[in-house]
Image: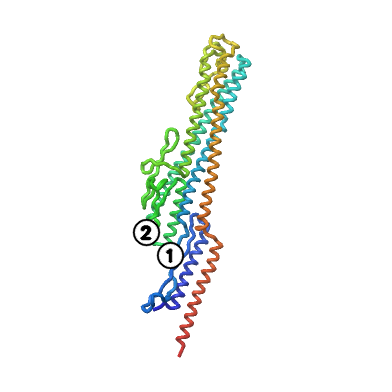
Amino acid sequence: MGADLLSIASSGARAAKAALDVTAQNISNASSEGYVRRSVSVAELSANSVSSSPTAINLGGVRVGGVVRNADSFRQSEVRRTGADAARADAEVQGLENIESAVEQTGVYDSIVNFEGSLQQLLSDPTDASLRASAIEQGRNLAQTFNVASSSLDAVSDGLHFEAQDGVDSVNLITSELAKVNLRLSRASDASSDQTSLLDQRDSLLEKLSKQVGISTSFGQNGVVSVSLGASSGPTLVSGGTASTFAMSIASDGTLGFTVDGTAATLASGSLAGKNQALTQLAANRTQLDDIATQVISVVNAAQASGVDLDGNAGQPLFSGTGAADITMIASGGSAIATAAAGSAANSRDASNLESLRTALTTADPAGSMNALLFDISSAVAGRTVTRDALDSVASSAKIALQAQAGVDLDHEAINLVRFQQAFQASGRVMQVASDIFDSILSIR
């Protein structure tokens, strides 16, 4: 028996009411982060009849199939991929900028130049006490600026390590939450409101996770997700309701190593990869800074050993230490500078050994090496900044493309409110007409 007019109208009213509810939900969550616009899925409802032929039009109204999330899995994957690359570049640039500030603002280059300048001034009168004291003071200042630069690099390294550990903790928290969402998804009814909310939560967690580490995903029944670190062949972070343990270790040079359940893993994208790249650059810059400090120590102390001081005694080392962190001026006064050649008498005005020291410093060129170090850091910052800006643009474009599809357009939703309200009223009017018809039929005598 075919469906009656009342049944058809009531099914239309139910569908319109469901659409109105979903539209209201879209509007109320328009500014909610991670919310994906919903729409109602409807299907034709046929009324079976024995007498119906296969080609006969035999409709029974409309059936609500469920709530549909308007999200494109490919676009979501692109947002995660491009976002991970942008996060890596941004973290690396921030780390490099901190390294640049640590080395440049401590004034090591200026201290080297000032120390060499004080030795040049001492040539004019090797026995002048004030010039000797100035040279010693400039040497002490040079040692201290090396110490400060090394300490500043330590502070940058400690900051990156702290941020990286926070990122690792965040990864473990997110993967644990994803495992819980997977368990709930496996028990949720298909296309239900609860399932769509869980899918929103799942996608939001995946996007947050991709900001920390690059990931690959695969989706199973009911939207349950499996997450791998890096490529799809990488170690598994989440499988069903189980989350692996992600951990990091710090090498002797300050760079990071990562493991998943104890197995070594390599990061290519995400902010953790960017921080590790910055730490790799920091380790190289620290080595260069130590080499420059060691160069100053060896050149000055070697020249000292070849001459005699103002009192006629064999020259003693001016500096001690093995690098930028522990270089120290150990001379007690200006008379310790060995300006005269070996065998010269006390208070000698001979400056041949001082000339040899200046020649050795000119040949070693610590100021030039420091300038090259500063240039390398600045060039790295400039180059990585260009890369970061380009990746940010790509990531923004991917996010805009997803937002255009999955985001809530209030103008569009306002139109839907009117449309579905009219559909609901029209269904109600059909029911009223059906009731009037039946009343008219029943009143026939």
Residue placed under numbered mark 1 in the picture: 66
Q: Residue furthest right?
A: 124
Q: Position of residue 131 (x, y in %)?
A: 61, 18
Q: Residue at x 45, y 74 (%)?
A: 10
SS state under label 2? helix
- Mark earlier in primary sequence (2, 1): 1
User: In 3D space, how far apart are the residues under numbered discs 2 and 1 (Cα atoms)?
Assistant: 17 Å
Position of the N terminus, as image quadrant, is bottom left
Q: Quadrant of residue 48?
A: bottom left
Q: Position of residue 286 (x, y in %)?
A: 49, 31
User: Mark 1: which amino acid?
Assistant: Gly
Q: Position of residue 121 (x, y in %)?
A: 62, 19
Q: Residue furthest bottom?
A: 445
Q: Residue at x 51, y 74 (%)?
A: 426
Q: How many marks?
A: 2
Q: Does 353 appear above or below 49?
A: above
Q: Does 324 appear above or below 18?
A: above
Query: Which circle marks residue 83 in the picture?
Result: none
Q: Position of residue 324 (x, y in %)?
A: 50, 27
Q: Quadrant of residue 353?
A: top right
Relative side of 242 to 22, left or right: left
SS state under label 1? strand
Residue placed under numbered mark 2 in the picture: 187
Q: Dot 1, how many residues are within 10 Å of its Cα: few (below 14), some (14-19), or many (20+)?
A: some
Relative side of 204 to 243, left or right: right
In front: label 2 or label 1: 1
Q: Dot 2, how many residues are within 10 Å of its Cα: few (below 14), some (14-19), or many (20+)?
A: few
Position of the C terminus, as image quadrant, is bottom left
User: Mark 2: which amino acid?
Assistant: Arg
